Amino acid sequence: MAQPSEGEGAPPRRGRQPAWIGVDWGTSSLRGARFDTDGGVVDERAFARGILTVTPGGFAAVFEDCFGDWMKPDGTRCLISGMAGSQQGWLEAAYCPCPASLDDVSARLAWVEPRRIAIVPGLSCEHTGTPDVMRGEETQVFGALRLLGLDSGTFVMPGTHSKWIRVDAGRIEAFTTLMTGEFYALLRQHSILARTLPPDDAELQGAAFDAGVAHALRSPGLLQSAFSVRTLSLFERMPLNDRPSYLSGLVIGEELRTRGVQGGEVVAIGAEALTRRYERALAQCGVRVRSVGAQATWSGLWSVATRIAA
Amino acid sequence: MAQPSEGEGAPPRRGRQPAWIGVDWGTSSLRGARFDTDGGVVDERAFARGILTVTPGGFAAVFEDCFGDWMKPDGTRCLISGMAGSQQGWLEAAYCPCPASLDDVSARLAWVEPRRIAIVPGLSCEHTGTPDVMRGEETQVFGALRLLGLDSGTFVMPGTHSKWIRVDAGRIEAFTTLMTGEFYALLRQHSILARTLPPDDAELQGAAFDAGVAHALRSPGLLQSAFSVRTLSLFERMPLNDRPSYLSGLVIGEELRTRGVQGGEVVAIGAEALTRRYERALAQCGVRVRSVGAQATWSGLWSVATRIAA
């Protein structure tokens, strides 16, 4: 890669920004992006090499395998977010307690190799004696703030373990985890409800999804509302192909009921298939939604990179 | 079996009560009881022959195999409650709509063989457009009423699918199903929480169970509170053997939160290991509990038998 030439006659730049790559290393997937000098993404890669597939001691080899060529020339640096910083990951990055700003997180990187590869720490917070944790989502939130030009707001990150995050003046003040996606999978695959569901999820049936959301919002809880999948099937009041969408609506609606969501604005960060469902469900609560996709991770990693002294 | 002799000189009794046996045929188990002429249970049997183990058309053979000898002499009758009356059972007994009294249920038996074997129908009710159903629990409630000398009250039947039942003047007015036991099993066996739990449930750890109940009661919902099993484990704030009891407390506490239980009195019907947990959890809500065991089924079947004209 050609080095940018320095202007003749100008004083030699000290601490010229090194080249950076960003890596999102989660439980089940490994993704990377290569940045240009302005933080633009010039290349992306994804591998089915989540941390669950890597044996202890094997992280460096997987990293070199997947991104070794991107780490040339020498001096190129890498920032990693996600579960790679967990106890089961490459190097444990101690949780940064909330409230936490981008500067707080950037000051607590766990360096796998000095001045070469660093892991962004996750965050922890406390709810009346119960801890909560995230790894990776903090980076996406900082990225979404940059992408949207915000410094405050409420963020939802739908997924296996959904996160609701409150940001004020650039600091993540508090957050809450809800096991929404996992409950859906448990009910879909392993519960008695699975017997009344088709083997595969068809595409989203909007009206059935909306009915599930509405039912969950007026129900006192999912232990009770989930049984309606069985009884509506038993009495043949719901077509087979509507049932997965209805169950999805029930579980997402339960998340909104639990959060007591009503009005206002929320930023949803995640894959479009999922954020679209949340937009639809949140509309029933009178909430305006702005959605941001996977680029939030790269934007967040770049934001951290700009905080690191060359 | 010796026929009871009739008093000399007395007019011959018409419609002498036949001998009765009662059968509780559920999804996973098959139990039977033989009654004396006053409804006392003189013998009991249990088999691992729940309806899921019986092929369509195979019910009569399983019944004769398990209880054929008890059906002598000819004229002996049998009442069956439970899932044997479902679509997947021996003979479908149409749901009896709520409100429903013992007389209503007794008038709607599904006779497998006229004057020999009958199935007690389950009940249905409606909650704002969503049906709810039970099969077998109605019989236990009628039995508990007889055993305790009550005609009204609130009943809880803990289990895979817990039922909360309201009885007024001998009629079951309404009921609600909560998938409490099933959610526990899903989280215990198939969720990410399973990774932080010991392979076997030790005996109940009372303080950990109570802490789970308390946490669920102050939490807005299980999607959120369940994650505390993971984080308390992660931060080593809960010993390994406490965790299954804590999770059990969370799920049962969620049931009580969902029901909005506060003060008053409840009758718990079920196996002692489970009703004891509910007594303990309900105590946190200031609820007095009376518990009734498996004999409620036999008492209920006998109550139905006494309503049937010889």
Image (cartoon, coloured by chain):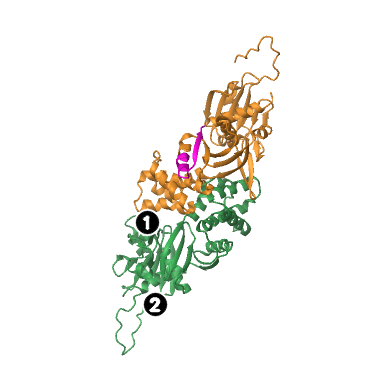
Chain colours: A green, B orange
Tell me the number on the disc at residue B206.
none
Q: Which label belongs to residue A37? A: 2
Q: Between residues B287 and A120, which one lies in front from this camera angle? A: B287
Instruction: Say if B234 sits above or below A296 in the image.
Output: above
**Quadrant of residue A87 in the image?**
bottom left
Q: Is residue A14 magenta?
A: no
Which one is earlier in the sequence, the residue at label 1 or at label 2? 2
* CA neighbours of label 2 inside 10 A, class few (<14), some (14 to 19), many (20+): few
User: Which one is in front, B151 or B91?
Assistant: B151
**Residue at x 56% of width, y 26% of height:** B33
Q: Position of residue B47 (x, y in %)?
A: 52, 29
Q: Chain of mark 1?
A: A
Name the mark on residue A54. Answer: 1
Please say whether residue A297 is visible from this viewpoint.
no
Q: Is residue B67 above or below residue A246?
A: above
Image quadrant assignment for residue A286:
bottom right
Which residues, given as a range, are shown in magenta?
B277-293
